[in-house]
Image: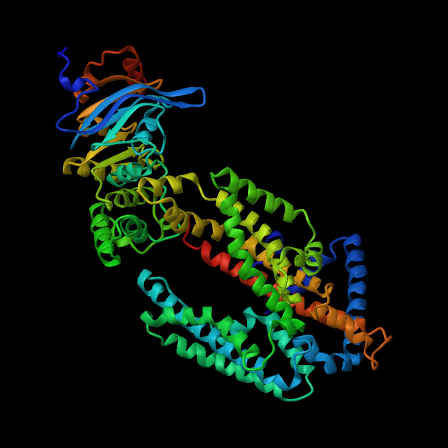
Amino acid sequence: MTAPTPLADATHAKGAEIIVLEGVDKYFGDFQALRDINMRVGRQEVVVVIGPSGGGKSTLIRCINRLEKHDRGRIVIDGIELTDDIKNIQEVRRETGMVFQQFNLFPHVTVLENVTLAPRQVRRMPKKDAEELAMAMLRRVKIPEQARKHPGQLSGGQQQRVAIARALAMQPKILLFDEPTSALDPEMIKEVLDVMEELAASGITMIVVTHEMGFARAVADRVVFMADGEIVEVGTPEHFFRSPEEARTKQFLAQIL
Amino acid sequence: MTSVDLEPTDAGRHIPAKSPARWVRRNLFRTWYDSSITIGFGVLFAWVLVGIVRFLLTADYTILRRNLALFMLGSFPRDQLHRPAAALLMIALATGLAAGALTAHRREIAAVTGVGYQSSRVIDVVRRFWPVVLLVVVLLALTETITPSLIVVGALGLGLIGVWAGRRIRARFRRLAWAALLVLPFLVYFMLAGFGGVGWRGWGGLHLNLFVTVAGVLLAFPLGLVLALGRKSSLPAVRTLSVAYIEFVRGVPLITLLLMGVFAIGFFLPAGVRPGTVTRVLIAITVFESAYIAEVVRGGLQAVPKGQVEAAQALGMTPWSIMRRIVLPQALRATIPAMVGQFISLFKDTTLVGVVGLPEVLSVAQDVNTQPDFVAQGLERLTLPFAALIFWVGSYTMSREARRLERKLGVGER
């Protein structure tokens, strides 16, 4: 067994920090969804969060762009602390893209308009520039030919790639993925994971909640295991899949591998 | 073929028969009680049909002929009839232009997305609006001079010219065609009322019903939208006020509001401000209609999934921009059927303004029976069905158009 490296600690980031969570608690009524979360993520780092359902994985990343409000502790994104100040929240959201399990594309506009909407509305980009940018992003996710269609005319895998392009068009520093392949048919999972792998290689900071262990093994810098609202164990993929230490981690991995 | 394409049919349930005779035997005369029901209802239908046809053929339509202008325009000065005629011609031209521009726009989009596009032919348009065509034919048959027919022919001609021109408007100028459509109501009003014409205080007949409907919709829709958003507001005061307004108004009959508008609104206005009856009626109808529209819109807002708002928030969009670009377009689309239902009932409810003394179609249909030539002859049996026909054509056309729109918007979404 190898000695725990600094990476095996959730509070240590690789490189300069871009996401800092300190003592974060989150309640839904009486239910505590997050318990004393401490975590630092470095620039260009890819963190994969795994764990059983209801363990707080989604809540964790939804707190990072304030889709959920944390009840205690501090969250600082790229030097901006998330408080009730709406200006800070908007700024963090501009720098943070999110990809959802159910895609959440806007069904009433075309694929191209899905991607140009935020740059035009939020960044006040001229239509022409926004469309050029959007086409570049659609090429990056390999579906430029679908630009004029409506989301409902695409397959699940294509829709999720559009959702990734939509997030990329804001040129965020951080991308959050909330189980991006869980709603997809098996044959479409790979096309989405391939795109995500390329993004990871391009140096964007990513936090990925997923059940795809192959992806975690191949792409993650660190793997975080969460259960019951806590971070149970953190480590490199090798550490994780070869020699997990905590009983809950072993049990979880035994169930899914 | 004039039947509506979306009506549910029983055709699928029957085994297809080879010949009409076999179909009849299978579906109408299979057993002795099938046969007796078929014959019984057949006789009943025939009897009613013969009665109606005989009545229509033998009736004396003088009461309608002589009062047609009253039905259409109320007491609009007869020496000013060129004004509504000119307004009609202008509406036809503008509608044609807009339709033409829309066709060109659709064709371009279809070309870009690679979908085939077939523009509608005249026969398609006639089929689509057959109730309106029927009404126009009936109305022209009742006219006593050739002038109205000439005006209708002129309007059709101008409409076609509009379509022709509209298709040739360059893409970048098309916005002007839409803008023209927005300015149209004001232009029409000016044509009727400007330079010694007659303002809405003097309007009557079908013209008044249409005016009250359109003005009611245009005024009540924005107010209803604001109320629906108010009801979902996070500010308790705004929310409470909206809920109180909506629930109060929905609990009161329209006729009460109309009477209050006419007799009680004066108490709330500063001395010297004395709005005319039509204005008062419009206020009452706007108050009434906006509460219902608010509830319709609220239903639509609830139909937009939470994930839509979250996705927009995650992109950094502001609440206002999320509402305008993401939530409302989807919510309003979802409300089309309910909204049109609301507008249809408003159109029919405009008959209630007769109660406060305005000369709308239904009250004309009753009042003409007090004219010396027609008094006490029971001619309501002619005038009331005539009024009913007018309302049916309006309501059924709206309903058909709404279904068309719904079907069109449903394509390729979600």
Q: Residue furthest bottom?
A: B146
At which x and y percent is residue A219?
18, 30
The answer to whether residue B359 is above or below residue A69 is below
Q: Inspect this view and state whether residue B333 appears.
A: yes
Q: Residue at x 39, y 75 (%)?
A: B167
Q: Residue at x 32, y 39 (%)?
A: B314
Q: Residue furthest right?
A: B376
At which x and y percent is residue B39?
79, 61
Query: In the image, is A159 to the left or to the right of A222?
Result: right
The answer to whether residue B133 is above or below residue B243 is below
Q: Residue at x 78, y 63 (%)?
A: B42
Q: Residue furthest front?
A: B271
At which x and y percent is residue A233?
25, 16
Query: In the image, is A52 to the left or to the right of B40?
Result: left
Q: Quadrant of residue B198?
A: bottom right
Q: Nearer the viewer, residue B240 or B337?
A: B240
At which x and y percent is residue B83?
57, 82
Query: In the image, is B60 to the left or to the right of B315?
Result: right
The answer to whether residue A6 is above or below residue B325 is above
Q: Quadrant of residue B115?
A: bottom left
Quarter holding the C terminus of chain A is top left
Quarter holding the N terminus of chain A is top left
The answer to whether residue A65 is above or below residue B179 is above
Q: Nearer the viewer, residue A140 or B338?
A: B338
Q: Nearer the viewer, residue B88 or A223?
A: B88
